[in-house]
Image (tube, rainbow, N blue to C red):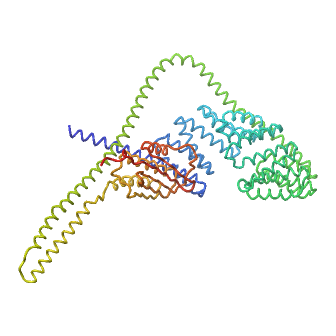
Amino acid sequence: MIFLFWIILILIIGCTSKNDFQKNKDTILNDSIVVLINRSKNKTGAIENRKSNLLRAYDLNNRQENDSIKNVYLLEITSQAYKLKDFNFFNETNNEAYNLSLKLKDTNGLAKIHWNLGSYYFKKEILDSSYFHYNQSYKFYKHIDRNYYAGKMLYNMAIVQQDQKNYTGSEVLSFQAIEKFDKKKHILNLYRCYNNLGIVYNNLKEFKKAIEYHNIALSYLKKTTDKRTYRESSLNNIGLVHHHSGNYINAIKSYKDGLKNIELKKSNINLYAKLLDNLAYSRLLNGDTINIEKIFHKALKIRNSIGFVSGVLISDLHLSEFSLYKKDTVNALRYAEESLKLAKNVNNHRDYLKALKLLTKIDSVNSKKYLLEYIKVSDSLQNNDRKLRNKFTRIRFETDEYIEETNRLSAQQTIILVASFALLAILSLLYFMRLQRSKNKALQSEAEQQQANEEVYKLLLKQQAKLEEGRLNERHRISEELHDGVLGRIFGTRMGMGFLDLKGDNETQVKYQLYVDELQEIEKEIRVISHELKNELLSGKADYIQVVEHLVKEQSIVTGFEYKIKDDDSVHWSMINDAVKINCYRMVQEAVQNINKYAQAKLVVIHFSVNDSVLTLSIKDNGVGFDTTNKSQGIGLKNITARTKKINGTFVIRSTIGEGTHLSITIPLDDATFKPT
C-alpha cells in the first residue's frame, strides 16, 4: 500500500509540473507574438524590419494550439499587413483568418475580415466589391450589437456612394451612421459624417445645406484634441461650396483661412497644394489675376514632386484656363492636352470630360471631334453610374430581402418552437446549474491553488529563515565555546607557564619564552575567530534576493533585456513580514511581465531600500514609455495597485513616451509588518 501511495504521488507531481510547464510555454509564446507585432507597429523602424517582425509573429502564431487565441493574433497580423501595404501577405492571412473564423463561428472575426477586404478593394478602386464587403461587415456588427463599428461601416459605404456620384444614397447612409455614434464618445466619427454630408449637398447644389453641415462638422472638431489637419480640410470644402455657388470672395477667404496654418506644408503638403490651387482658381474667376500664375505653378510643382497625378491633372486644367484668359492659346492648348492625356491614363472620367470641354473652346480646328468625344463619354459614364448605383441598391436590397425571408421562416417555426420551449428551458436550467456548479468548483480550486502556492512560498521562506537561524545559533555556540572554553584554558596554561621558575641554559630559556609568546598569539587568533563567528553575516537577505533574481532572470530571456537588482544594507529581510515579501515578489513579477509585453526595454533596474521604517521598491526601465493620463489600466497595473493597498502601501507610476517608465511602491514597516524577534 505504501509503495502504491508513492507511485500515485509521483504521477500527480509529474502531471502538475507538466501542466505548469505548458502554461509557462504558452505565456512565453504569446508574449513573444505581442512583442513582435508591437515592433511591426513602430513607425520609426525601417519598413523591411517591420515586415520581417510581422512575418516572425505569424510564424510563431502558427505554433498556437488554441484556435481562438490563434485567430485573435491572426486578425491583428492581417490588419497590420494591410497598414504596411504588404498586400500579398494581407490576402494570405485574411483568407486563413476567414476559414478559421468560420470554423470557430466567430462573428466578430468575420466582421473584421470583411472590413479589411472592403478597405483593400476601396484602395484598388474596385468599388462594387468594396461596398459589398463593407455591407457584409455592417451586417455582422449589427447582429452582435456593435453599434460603433456598424456606424463606421455605414460611413465607409457612404463614402463609396459619394465617390460614385450616388449622392442621395450617400446622404441616407451618412444619417444612418450618425445614429450609431455616441455624441460624447465618438466625436471624430461624427465630424467625418457631417463633413461628408457637406460634400454631398455641395454636389447636389444645395449650397445652404452644405455650409450648414460643414459648420456642424467644425463644431464637433472643436470638442476633440485630435484635430490633425481636419479643420483646414473643412475650410477647403467650405471654399469649394462658395466657389460652386459663385461666391468667389467667400471662397477666397475660406482658402486663405486654411493656409494660415504655418505647419500645414509639413503636416499635409497635398492639402496645402490643394488650397493654393483652389485659391488661385477662385481669384481667376473673380477677375483678380495678380501673381496667381506663380501660385498655380507652385501648386503644380508640389503635386509633381509628390507624384499626385490627379492633382497635377487639375493644376493643368486651371493653368489652361488661365492661359486662355490671357489669350495665350499655345500654352492653353498645351496644358489642356496634358490634362486630357493624364485623365485618360488614370481613368479619371470627370476631369477627362472637363479637358474635352476646354479643348472645344481652345482648338477650333478639332473642336467638333472633341465635342463628339465629350458626348460619347458623357453618355457612357451616365449609363455606367446608373448601373453601379443600381448594383449598390441590389446589394443592400438582397441583404434586406434575405433578412426578411429569414424572419418569415422564423415566424413559421415559432409554433413548433413554443411547444418544445418549456422542456428545453427546464433542461437548459438544469444544465446551466450544473455548469455553474462546475465553474464555481473550478474557481474555488483555482483560488485554493493560489493560496497553496503562497503558503508553499511562505513555508519556503520560513524554512530558509529557520535554517539561517540554526546556522547563526551554531556559530554563536562555537564562538562562545572557543572564547569561554578553549581560550580560557589556553590563557590559564600560558599564565601557569609564565610563573614557572624554569632552570636551564640560555638556549632553553629562549625557547621556553618563544613557546609562551606563541601561545599568546594563538589566543589572539582564537579571539578574532570567535568575534567573526558572532557577527550575523547572513540575515536572510541573500536568500530572498536570490528568489527575486531567479524570477527576473527567467523573464529577461523572453525579450533579452539586461537587469540590475540593488538591495541596500538598510533592508533586513529576516525581520520583514512574509506577506510583504510575497506581495513585493508578485509586484516585481507583474511589472517585469508588462515590460516584456509593451516596453521594448534594454535595461531594467530593481532597487529595494528602507528609510524611516518605510520600504521602497523601485522598478525602472528604459523602454518606449506610455501616456499615464490614459485612464484605462491594464490588468498588470491593476494587480500591483491592489497588492499595494493590501499591505497599506502607496503606488506611483511615472512614464514619458520614448524615455521609459518608473514604478515606485512604498510600504510602511509598522509593528504589524515585522516578525517577532
Q: Residue at x 31, y 43 (%)?
A: 13
Q: Looking at the image, which is closer to me, 98 or 379? A: 98
Q: Looking at the image, which is closer to me, 474 or 375? A: 474
Q: Looking at the image, which is closer to me, 110 or 211? A: 211
Residue 475 lies, with reference to residue 123, above or below; the image says below
Q: Residue at x 72, y 53 (%)?
A: 268
Q: Looking at the image, which is closer to me, 434 or 89? A: 434
Observer able to see residue 392: no
Question: Extreme left residue here?
Answer: 503
The image quadrant that residue 608 belongs to is bottom left
Q: Residue at x 76, y 50 (%)?
A: 346
Number of disc labels:
0
- Residue 132, given in percent of the width and then of the height, sits at 67, 37
44 left or right of 622?
right
- Residue 59, given in percent of the width and then of the height, sits at 50, 50
Observer able to see residue 168: yes
Residue 500 lies, with reference to residue 669, above or below; the image says below
- Residue 14, given in percent of the width and then of the height, sits at 32, 44
| Quadrant where the image shows the N terminus | top left
- Residue 82, given in percent of the width and then of the height, sits at 62, 48
